[in-house]
Image (tube, rainbow, N blue to C red):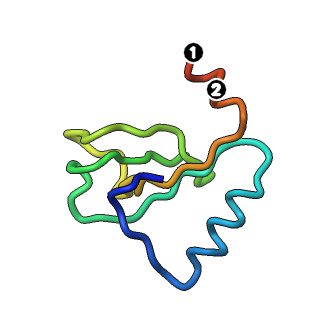
Amino acid sequence: MLGDNIFHGQTLGSLLSTAAKRTSGATVFAYPVTDPERYGVVEFGPDGKAISIEEKPKKPKSRYAVTGIYFYDASVVEWRRI
């Protein structure tokens, strides 16, 4: 979680709990914005799963800005080496 953001909402706790219980894969939280070119933007596939994240794209692939909350399984350590 990025330290310079403030998060709130009635369902936030349950969303975080659900993401923390996952044993494989990743969860990236995103929020719709009107100016996605100012943020990291997540692109979704037809199944609703994230397929890419691009930082401050000139032509955003969605209007969903990455909020800075990420949950990864243990395989993320291996991905870092690529």
Residue closer to the observer: 36 or 19? 19
What residue lies at 64% left-to-right and 42% top-to-bottom?
A: 72
What is the CA distance from the residue labelled 1 to the residue labelled 2? 7 Å
What x and y, as percent, mark residue 25? 70, 42
Residue closer to the observer: 34 or 78? 78
Residue 68 horizontal side relative to residue 16, left or right = left
Instruction: Return the residue at label 2.
Output: 77
Instruction: Return the residue at label 1.
Output: 81
User: In this picture, is 75 found above or below 30?
Assistant: above
User: In this picture, is 45 found above or below 6?
Assistant: above
Residue furthest front in the image: 3
Q: Amino acid at mark 1?
A: Arg
Residue 16 horizontal side relative to residue 36, left or right = right
Q: Which mark is residue 36?
A: none
Residue 20 horizontal side relative to residue 12, left or right = right
Q: Quadrant of the C terminus?
A: top right
Would residue 46 be seen by someone viewing this image from the given angle?
Answer: no
Would residue 2 be seen by someone viewing this image from the given angle?
Answer: yes
Tags 1 and 2 in contact by the CB under 8 Å rule? yes
What x and y, as percent, mark residue 71? 61, 49
> Where, by quadrant of the figure, is residue 55 drawn?
top left
Q: Residues within 10 Å of mark 2 (few under 14, many from 20)?
A: few
